[in-house]
Amino acid sequence: MTPLIAVLPDHVANQIAAGEVVQRPASIVKELLENSIDAGATKITIHLSGAGKTGIVVTDNGSGMNEKDAELCFRRHATSKIKTAEDLFALTTRGFRGEAMASIAAVSHVILRTNNEETSLGTQLNLEDGKVISKAGFPGPKGSIVEVKNLFYNVPARRKFLKNDRIELRHCIDEFHRVALLHAQIEWVLKSDDKLLFHLQAEPLRRRISAIFGRKFDERLVPIQETTEVVSVGGFILKPEYAKKKRGEQFFFVNGRYIKSPFLHNALREAFEEVLSGDHHP
């Protein structure tokens, strides 16, 4: 009797697993930026083509990788971030599952150029369907350049579900805002096709907020700082008279990670309910 259950080929399993990590270009932007941050980069440049659907290039001056690590980073469940399950309870890095690079490579064409301080010549890898198809030396400076092209080229059904360029670019910019706000100590450059969208110098958080959302924000910001035995809370909030009818510009970060929390949104709204009208949010 022929069995009904069959083991999927690796490339099919990888494409399915990639759906958990890569939903749209913004997903790739998030993962690549977090890798650059974990590599200790002080300057990170993002260049989007076709709102990220055609291409995403992230360049950093981080620690870079040697040839062996460059190849291993595309293996599923390969990570430098944790060694044991107990490490999950003391994470100081952003990525940790060893899924991101493997998932990205499974649904796009990827070129990795990287160099560290161990050798004078770095490594360039070209990947298709998650596999290395060519390898060469890379004479560039210390750091990494990750180029992702033709997202979902091998999963046309997924590609059809992507929105138009304006919407996909908006998602990429939103992801950029979250990461750039949390890491004001890093210099950031964001380009879309031939247009420079942001060039943010390393700066204090207050100036970073104004650089992203407009200079008028600086005089409207109120600093917040409170520390107890169990928690420390800090940040900035706009004066009540500048509240908006949408809460899209509320950003919460816990232990160095952006989170979406109805509980925190509602708690903030309740704290301001006596000074805000019913349809406005701080």
Image: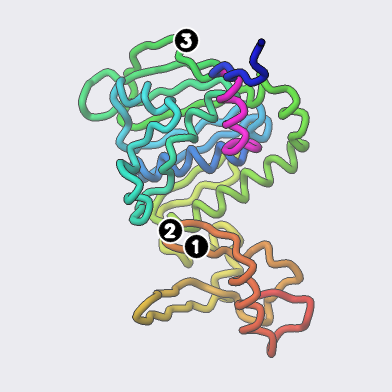
Q: Amino acid at mark 1?
A: Phe
Q: Is residue 18 magenta?
A: yes
Q: Vertical placement of 154 versus 53: above or below?
A: above
- Percent across and percent down for residue 161 are 76, 33
- Within 10 angstroms of label 3, few (less than 14), some, or many (20 or more) residues? few
Task: Locate residue 139: give its quadrant.
Answer: top left
Q: Residue at x 57, y 38 (%)?
A: 21
Which disc number belongs to residue 256? Answer: 2
Q: Vertical placement of 12 versus 99: above or below?
A: above
Which disc number belongs to residue 133? Answer: 3
Which is nearer the eye, 97 or 220? 97
Which quarter of the rendering shows the C terminus?
Answer: bottom right
In contact (CB < 8 Å): disc 1 and disc 3: no
In contact (CB < 8 Å): disc 2 and disc 1: yes
Q: Secondary structure at mark 2?
A: loop
Spatial distance from mark 3 to mark 2, Cα to Cα? Answer: 36 Å
Q: Which residues are magenta?
A: 11-24
Q: Secondary structure at mark 3?
A: strand
Which is nearer the eye, 188 or 53? 53
